[in-house]
């Protein structure tokens, strides 16, 4: 019998920064596209940020007041101890700030849309942008762009057919692009002509003619709604968020509005030029295309894909992709949802009861609530963390390389390999056997690989 030196298979596992997703193993170097330059005459980012701060000064002031006056434990906080803007709170803010309650409510709503205040159920807390407001120009500009994206919420919708309002909201990106290309005042009459043309196109696109004899065509809701009042509402709302000036029968994009429209057009162009054609793809196809990209490039693709469709539908589509069997798509879907931000919160909370999505949703919500991504994993139970480890390992096994799967051991919460194997066997992930077999094949330590193979066999046969 050949003598062998005893090996200690109970290797200590170090906890470095957890591997968030497998796509980092798929990084492939691509020629970098030169950074595009904004149109000539666009102010520098620092000047744009100054404009945004000026426009959002009232919202920032109310947000700071709420942070100081309504923080739990402060004297004079609301009766229930939560930072809600009740009638009494609005009156109090108006008195402290020298405003009317109506002005306070307008500034409060603006602060919410810009991410200066984050509302969770019946409580509110200061957003991370408020903390960075005076020192981070990029945070200020992202806050203003969030307000710009939510322009249709800046003013109450006119009491018209909801279908007609939705058509106008869908048509406005084309009108904004026209304003941006015009680089100057545009008569409202010309915008109305363009709006009517775009709405006709939208109605034609949704028209489906089934086979067989058809009854007389019936007018759709909103088909006879005059568009001029709706255009007036849309331009007024965009003016309220600072995207354009509107008066004397003309509309003109502000420097901020022109820059924001250019940024969104550029994002769409980047996605359209990507190998996967992500702008036209379904969520699943888009995520698969982004698996080949570096994290920053993937986030740009997510932003462009999201910019081209309504947020609610996009979030639903991403979560549907996350429900599939591919663990890589699960991780990427929640990365894309991080780009969505606050509008995705209700639907993310709704999937907490879905076992395959719960760990991802908990991490997303923790980061959304302001927890440092490095510390977010601490909110998971041991079982949830182990399930997530197996799921991420499945993504690495399917799409990554063997060395990355070996390094993935370092992100486990367990202190030793035997403890990890015991808990992996107990967690019941459907991919446990495949993950353990792949890990055994990849690991260079024969004794550890044998222990992992034995664990895989025990899971497969139902043994202990």
Image (spheres, grey):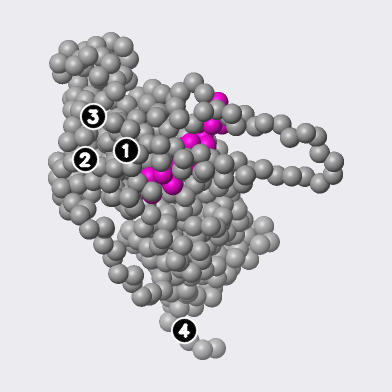
Nearest to N terminus: mark 3 or mark 1? 3
Nearest to N terminus: mark 4 or mark 1? 4
Where does label 2 land, which residue?
Answer: 52
Q: Residue at x 61, y 56 (%)?
A: 325
Secondary structure under badge 4? Answer: loop
Q: Residue at x 18, y 41 (%)?
A: 51
Residue 95 on the magenta span? no
Mark 3 touches mark 2? (CB < 8 Å): no
Q: Rounded to the nearest whole Å, what is the CA distance between mark 3 and mark 2?
A: 11 Å
Residue 379 as seen in the image, left or right of residue 254: right
Mark 4 touches mark 1? (CB < 8 Å): no
- In this view, the residue in front, 151 or 212, is 212
Q: Which mark is residue 59?
A: 3
Q: Which mark is residue 4?
A: 4
- The span picked out in magenta is 161-177
Secondary structure under badge 1? Answer: strand
Nearest to N terminus: mark 3 or mark 4? 4
Nearest to N terminus: mark 3 or mark 2? 2
Q: Rounded to the nearest whole Å, what is the CA distance between mark 1 and mark 2?
A: 19 Å
Q: Residue at x 15, y 16 (%)?
A: 98
């Amino acid at each position: 019998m050949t003598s062998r030196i005893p090996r200690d298979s109970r290797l200590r596992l170090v906890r470095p920064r957890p591997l968030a997703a497998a796509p980092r193993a798929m990084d492939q170097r691509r020629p970098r596209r030169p950074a595009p330059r904004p149109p000539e005459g666009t102010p520098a980012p620092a000047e744009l940020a100054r404009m945004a701060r000026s426009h959002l000064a009232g919202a920032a002031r109310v947000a700071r007041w709420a942070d100081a006056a309504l923080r739990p434990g402060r004297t004079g906080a609301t009766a229930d101890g939560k930072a809600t803007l009740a009638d009494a709170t609005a009156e109090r803010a108006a008195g402290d700030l020298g405003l009317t309650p109506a002005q306070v409510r307008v500034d409060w709503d603006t602060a919410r849309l810009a991410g200066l205040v984050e509302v969770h159920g019946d409580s509110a807390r200061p957003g991370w942008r408020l903390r960075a407001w005076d020192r981070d120009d990029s945070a200020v500009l992202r806050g203003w762009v969030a307000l710009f994206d939510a322009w249709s919420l800046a003013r109450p919708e006119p009491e018209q057919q909801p279908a007609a309002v939705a058509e106008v909201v869908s048509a406005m990106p084309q009108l904004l692009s026209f304003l941006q290309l015009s680089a100057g005042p545009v008569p409202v009459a010309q915008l109305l002509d363009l709006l009517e043309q775009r709405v006709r196109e939208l109605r034609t696109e949704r028209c489906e003619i089934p086979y067989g004899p058809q009854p007389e065509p019936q007018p759709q809701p909103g088909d006879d709604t005059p568009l001029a009042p709706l255009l007036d509402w849309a331009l007024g709302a965009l003016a309220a968020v600072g995207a354009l000036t509107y008066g004397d029968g003309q509309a003109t994009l502000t420097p901020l509005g022109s820059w924001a429209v250019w940024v969104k057009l550029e994002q769409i162009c980047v996605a359209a030029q990507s190998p996967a054609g992500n702008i036209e793809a379904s969520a699943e196809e888009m995520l698969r295309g982004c698996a080949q990209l570096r994290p920053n490039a993937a986030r740009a693709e997510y932003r462009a894909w999201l910019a081209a469709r309504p947020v609610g539908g996009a979030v639903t589509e991403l979560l549907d992709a996350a429900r599939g069997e591919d663990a890589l798509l699960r991780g990427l879907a929640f990365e894309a949802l991080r780009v969505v931000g606050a509008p995705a919160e209700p639907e993310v909370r709704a999937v907490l009861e879905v076992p395959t999505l719960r760990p991802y949703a908990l991490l997303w919500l923790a980061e959304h609530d302001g927890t440092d991504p490095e510390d977010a994993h601490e909110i998971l139970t041991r079982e949830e963390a182990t399930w997530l480890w197996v799921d991420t390992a499945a993504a690495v096994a399917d799409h990554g390389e063997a060395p990355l799967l070996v390094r993935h051991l370092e992100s486990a919460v367990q202190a030793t390999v035997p403890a990890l194997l015991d808990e992996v066997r107990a967690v019941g992930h459907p991919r446990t056997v495949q993950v353990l077999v792949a890990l055994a094949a990849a690991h260079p330590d024969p004794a550890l690989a044998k222990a992992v193979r034995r664990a895989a066999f025990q899971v497969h046969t139902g043994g202990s």
